[in-house]
Image (cartoon, rainbow, N blue to C red):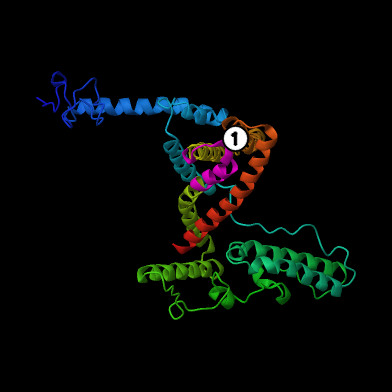
Amino acid sequence: MTQQLTQPADLHCANCGTALQGEFCHVCGQSVRSVLKPVHGMLEDTLDLVLNVDGRVIHTLPPLFLRPGFLTLEFFAGRRTRYLAPFRLMFTLCLLAFFVLPIALDSGGMSFEPTVNVNGSPFQHAGTPAEVDRLLQKQLAQLAPTSKIPVVGSLASRQLDQARLELAREAARRRIELGDKTAVIPDTVDKLPEAAASTHPPAERETRNLFGQHRDLRKDSIKVSWLPDFLNHRLNRAVQRISENIAAMSGPGNHAAVKERLLGQFLSALPGAMFFMLPAFAVLLKLMYVFRRRLYMEHLIVALHSHAFLFLSLLLGTLLHMLGVALKPHATWLAGPISMLVTGLWLWAPTYLLIMQKRVYRQGWPMTILKYVMVGWCYFWLLAIAIMGAAVLGLAE
């Protein structure tokens, strides 16, 4: 027979000795129920917890998505029991969104690689082969700055080579039209003429690092005098890994596997970087509404609910994309409606945040719009910093 730690008849808490007035001690919060119980009792408690959480999810997610500012105002009014806590809500949606996003990237149609486009035929008005060559050099010069950008040039290397190939083919076709019998249309990147070759020799691309320099970090290590040795060692190791990863992206080998690994590292670092945005966004709201005499914690709750909505929107948009990819071979007619839903979702996000700011802070529309634009502009740069930080962390792994 299971022994009870505290009997209801005792009317005193077994932990602090306070006289009990209900199922829980009003001083320390310990329950009168014993933790020593049969297995079926533990299963009952687990089921009760799951059903309770499910009930709060049902009461939380619809107003979070459809009623801007409602959950925040409910929280301020003290009506909190039936809803998920702001931090738990945001944290759960963040994990779900960044768990589904890599799956959607693997499903096709979504890519973080930069694209390089060649619009039209730039050689159609050339009257001589020499003029074709001059225009080809001009077009290639426009691609050169992109190839020199650290990281971006490496990620777009395949697109840059394809763009050079298309330009060389167009130039060769025009030369043939002009009667040049020596012109040959290249079919692969390896057969490009010297004029259309990459702006950096292969050996140079393999050894260039993030800073555009050639350096041996083992000989030329970074030493910050006020940092402990172990942090200096970690800093040098991170810089070395960044250099190696960039070299792997631009050098010989399986670029797709390298980029997939780095993208996974970037996505794993991004949620942590996004947590930096929460207190920063709350500080922006505090500065914008400094004369409203609200506590910083109130602005932080607004930030938590705002980011929870953004993560929910990202999750729904990603799921809609995956649904469209899955249904495309079987029901092509659904591509249009799904695309409209995704577009409507992205339009609803900024509208939602504006309405939320209006309802929570209760100012007129002109002042609300002005502050909304100012906060959005500052948030954009903070988000860019967070994404760049996640990219650096991903490269340093």
Q: Say left or right for 90 vs 134.
A: left
| Residue nearest the observer in this picture, 353 or 239 | 353
| Residue nearest the observer in this picture, 27 or 119 | 27
Magenta residue span: 279-297
Q: Say left or right for 266 vs 1.
A: right
Seen at 58% across and 77% down, the residue is: 204
Q: Name the residue at the top extreme.
A: 9
| 195 shown above or below 319 | below
Q: Is residue 176 magenta?
A: no
Q: Say left or right for 368 vs 283.
A: right
| Residue nearest the observer in this picture, 126 or 318 | 318
| 166 shown above or below 88 | below
Residue 104 appears in the rendering: no
Q: Name the residue at the bottom extreme.
A: 219
Q: Main secondary structure of the magenta part?
A: helix
Packing grade of label 1 (10 A; few <14, some 14-19, many >=20) is many
Q: Which residue is mark 1?
A: 357
Dot 1 lies on which element?
helix
| 386 shown above or below 255 | above
Q: Amino acid at mark 1?
A: Gln
Q: From the image, which quarter does the C terminus lie in?
A: bottom left
Q: Is residue 289 magenta?
A: yes
Across and down, in percent, residue 360 comes to 56, 31
| Image-quadrant location for residue 9 | top left
Residue 378 appears in the rendering: yes
Q: From the image, which quarter does the N terminus lie in?
A: top left
Q: Name the residue at the right extreme.
A: 127
Across and down, in percent, residue 122 comes to 82, 63
| Residue nearest the observer in this picture, 360 or 250 | 360
Q: Say left or right for 173 vs 252.
A: right
